[in-house]
Amino acid sequence: MLKNIAVIGSTGLLGKPVTFALVNAGFTVKALVRNIARAAKELPEEVQFVEGDIKNSVDLEKTFSRCDAVYINLSIKDIEKPGDWHTETDGVKLIIEAARKTGIKRLAMISSLVHFYQGMHGFYWWAFDVKQKSVQLIQNSGIPYTIFYPSSFMENFYFNYKKGKYLVLAGKSEHKQYFIAGAYYGRQVARSFQLNPVDNKEYAVQGLAGFTTDEACGIFKQYYKKEKLSIVRAPLGFIKFLGKFAQGMHYGAHIIEALNKYPEKFQAEQTWEELGKPVITLKEFAANQ
């Protein structure tokens, strides 16, 4: 039975709700963090902290000691370049090595659905190669694993699309996305550890209803209570042009293009059956921000 979970990336936008959900589900949680004082202000008091760095194998082994499983929440920063050290590949290699040394019984990791857009309509982006390699590393680790492929998260509206009193869109969303709240995703992750399957598992993570980004922003704008929001749109071509001079814009242009064009289909039936059906609607999420 899995009782003790180590978390890598616990203070991230999506790592935090998973950490809370694991604590609420009764797991003992240990987190590798860069600054304990800062992390302690953001996470439940029950979390045990190890201060260190993912690049340090000793820190990883200390974190994994006496743990049964590891949850990995890593992502590429928008300032990274192809030749840089990437947590999703170079870091995952170190995690797997430390997991083997410490007898970890299961690895769980968040990936994404949209990275499957790689190769469609001539689209290629090195960052999606990194994400695919990360998945392959976990699959080939020899350690039982669970991989989550989420659709877009509702939190993006507040932390990414919202700029002051504006919701900023770029380009035109062509397909529906099944937005899910990070809090409910956290509950699904916790449930996966409670089930403790003996085989490898891969789950599509999607919300109750599909919306284009335009439709979803309209809902968020309507039900957000703190202030009146307006929706503005920037041409994607203009974002790509700015990307020639700013790495962050270059990253943003690619992820926006993929999100706008990826033909996401609903495929979370098995996830709902095994890990629970989401209950948080986009309306409810917006109203409670």
Image (tube, helix red, strand yellow):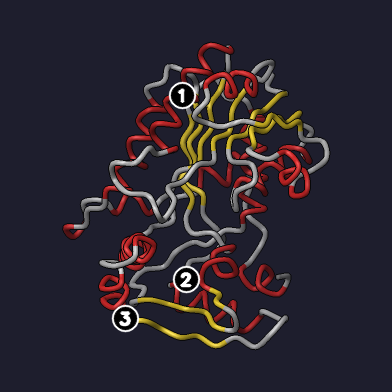
Q: Nearer the viewer, residue 36 or 202?
A: 36
Question: The disc labelled 1 sits on which kind of residue?
Answer: Leu
- Residue identified by numbered label 3: 235
Question: The disc labelled 3 sits on which kind of residue?
Answer: Pro
Q: CA distance from mark 3 to mark 2?
A: 20 Å
Disc 1 or disc 2, which is closer to the eye?
A: 1
Q: Which mark is residue 4?
A: none
Q: Quadrant of the N terminus?
A: top right
Identify the mark nearer the N-term, 1 or 3.
1
User: Is residue 263 shown to the viewer in this render?
Assistant: no
Is 109 left or right of 129, judged from the image as shown?
right
- The residue sitting at 36% across, 73% down in the picture is 173
Assess disc 3: are there few (<14), some (14-19) or many (≥20) residues with their C-alpha within 10 Å of its C-alpha.
few
Assess disc 2: are there few (<14), some (14-19) or many (≥20) residues with their C-alpha within 10 Å of its C-alpha.
some
Q: CA distance from mark 1 to mark 3?
A: 40 Å
Q: Secondary structure at mark 1?
A: helix
Q: Secondary structure at mark 3?
A: loop
Quadrant in the picture for residue 64: top right
Question: The disc labelled 2 sits on which kind of residue?
Answer: Phe
Disc 3 or disc 2, which is closer to the eye?
A: 3
Quadrant in the picture for residue 223: bottom right
Assess disc 1: are there few (<14), some (14-19) or many (≥20) residues with their C-alpha within 10 Å of its C-alpha.
some
Is 149 left or right of 234, judged from the image as shown?
right
Position of 208 relative to 163 (above/below):
above
Identify the mark nearer the N-term, 1 or 2.
1
Q: Secondary structure at mark 2?
A: loop
Q: Which mark is residue 94?
A: 1
- Residue identified by numbered label 2: 211
Q: Nearer the viewer, residue 225 or 276?
A: 225
Q: Nearer the viewer, residue 168 or 106?
A: 168
